[in-house]
Image (spheres, rainbow, N blue to C red):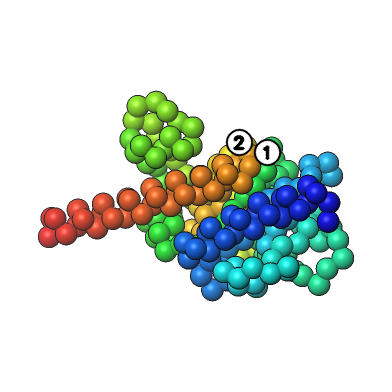
């Protein structure tokens, strides 16, 4: 394994370890990816069906711009690898993360009819590089198409910047950034906003009952 590939592997393994400690990979769900090279495109992605709370030599495999293995392997790429292909083919992002949490699933269900969920005036919005007073961040919500190429096509319509986030209704959130640090920062900020919003709604419901 080349030095660059080793470095990217370690970076992705570090992120996986941190997210596993948060219990964000229930029932083998979720998938992570990190770009190794842009020309031609290759990136590491989590192998399908693995317990992401464990660390093994088979956690990731290298895939190409079509989302298929770029090296000889018995491992199968994550089912949602094509979402990561959309990110890397449309932007200069270096890392993309997809997790299922109760909070992001509930938020996606509550606001699916609006096609997005918007947060305003929260201090943590600065994590998205928005520093003005009362800044807002909107996260698109797309349908959970069972056909992955169809899902990837709809997802790709919302991938324009080198860092961003998209919710899939009752499925999970995919975030991406220029590197692993930024992608993780986006994910943590999104999940904070989701948790805060749901807790606030719960407290308001109790107060007025």
Residue density around tag 2, few if under 14, some if 14–19, many if 20 or more, within 10 Å: some
Q: Where residue 48 sits: x, y (%)? A: 68, 69
- The image quadrant of residue 163 is top right
The numbered mark, 1 or 2, whose residue comes first in the sequence reads 1
Q: Can the viewer see residue 128 in this picture?
A: yes
Side of 197 relative to 90 (left or right): left
Q: Where residue 90 sits: x, y (%)? A: 69, 40
Q: Quadrant of the N terminus?
A: bottom right
- Seen from this angle, which residue lies furthest right? 72
Residue for point 38% across, 31% down: 135
Whether the residues at callouts 1 and 2 have beta carbons within 8 Å, the answer is: yes
| Residue 91, disc | 1
Residue density around tag 1, few if under 14, some if 14–19, many if 20 or more, within 10 Å: some
Side of 185 relative to 1 (left or right): left
Q: Where residue 31 sits: x, y (%)? A: 62, 61
| Residue 127, disc | none
| Residue 161, disc | 2
Helix, strand or loop status at disc 1: loop
- Residue nearest the viewer, comparing 203 with 86: 203
Residue for point 78% across, 47% down: 4
């Amino acid at each position: 394994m080349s030095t660059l590939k080793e470095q990217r592997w370690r970076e992705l393994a570090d992120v996986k370890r941190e997210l596993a400690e948060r219990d964000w990979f229930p029932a083998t769900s979720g998938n992570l990816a990190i770009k190794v090279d842009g020309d031609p495109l290759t990136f590491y992605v989590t192998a399908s069906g693995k317990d992401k709370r464990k660390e093994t030599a088979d956690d990731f495999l290298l895939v190409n711009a079509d989302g298929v293995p770029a090296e000889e392997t018995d491992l199968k790429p994550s089912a949602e690898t094509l979402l990561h292909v959309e990110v890397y083919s449309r932007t200069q992002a270096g890392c993309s993360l997809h997790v299922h949490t109760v909070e992001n699933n509930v938020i996606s269900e509550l606001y699916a009819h609006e096609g997005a969920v918007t947060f305003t005036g929260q201090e943590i919005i600065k994590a998205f590089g928005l520093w003005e007073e009362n800044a807002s961040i909107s996260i698109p919500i797309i349908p959970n198409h069972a056909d992955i190429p169809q899902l990837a096509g709809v997802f790709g319509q919302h991938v324009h910047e080198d860092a961003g986030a998209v919710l899939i209704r009752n499925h999970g959130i995919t975030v991406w950034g220029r590197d692993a640090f930024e992608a993780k920062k986006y994910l943590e900020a999104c999940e904070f906003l989701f948790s805060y919003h749901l807790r606030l709604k719960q407290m308001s419901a109790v107060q007025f009952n």
